[in-house]
């Protein structure tokens, strides 16, 4: 159900970010946090069977790195938007 809800949440984040709204930053951070966690939970059995599955180009590593990027940039962005 969460992955289906991303059909609404992802465009909402894009619109809020495009209009430079602080809510878009926090929503993006929240969505990415839950998205990364959901992907790890859903893919954990496959990762347990084959740990080499992690660094594949389309898999957990890229989404995890992107999630870290979103979270790291979410902290300073509200200050930049205020100024």
Image: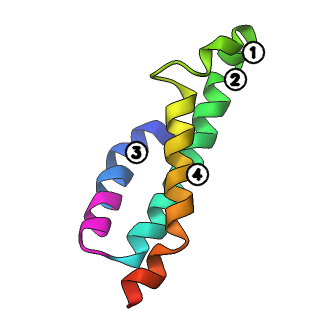
Q: Residues within 10 Å of mark 4 (few under 14, many from 20)?
A: some
Indicate the secondary structure of the residue bearing disc 4.
helix
Residue 48 marker = 1
Point out the frontmost of discs 4 and 3: 4
Q: Position of residue 23 (x, y in %)?
A: 42, 74
- Mark-to-mark CA distance, 2 and 1: 6 Å
Q: Image quarter for residue 28? A: bottom left
Q: Position of residue 63 (x, y in %)?
A: 50, 37
Q: Are marks 2 and 1 in contact (CB under 8 Å)?
A: yes
Q: Residues within 10 Å of mark 1 (few under 14, many from 20)?
A: few
- Mark-to-mark CA distance, 4 and 1: 22 Å
Q: Are marks 4 and 1 in contact (CB under 8 Å)?
A: no
Picture mark count: 4
Segment colored magenta? 13-20
Say if residue 9 shows up in the picture: yes
Residue 33 marker = 4
- Residue 16 highlighted magenta (yes or no): yes
Q: Position of residue 60 (x, y in %)?
A: 57, 29
Indicate the secondary structure of the residue bearing disc 1.
helix
Nearer to me, 28 or 52: 52
Q: Are marks 2 and 4 in contact (CB under 8 Å)?
A: no
Q: Which residue is mark 3?
A: 6
Q: Earlier in the sequence, mark 2 or mark 4?
A: 4
Residue 44 marker = 2
Q: Are marks 2 and 3 in contact (CB under 8 Å)?
A: no
- Mark-to-mark CA distance, 4 and 3: 13 Å
């Amino acid at each position: 159900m969460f992955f289906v809800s991303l059909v609404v949440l992802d465009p909402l984040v894009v619109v809020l970010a495009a209009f430079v709204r602080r809510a878009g930053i926090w929503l993006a951070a929240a969505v990415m946090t839950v998205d990364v966690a959901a992907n790890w939970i859903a893919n954990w059995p496959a990762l347990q069977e084959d740990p080499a599955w992690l660094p594949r180009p389309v898999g957990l590593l890229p989404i995890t790195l992107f999630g870290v990027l979103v979270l790291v940039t979410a902290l300073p962005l509200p200050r930049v938007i205020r100024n």
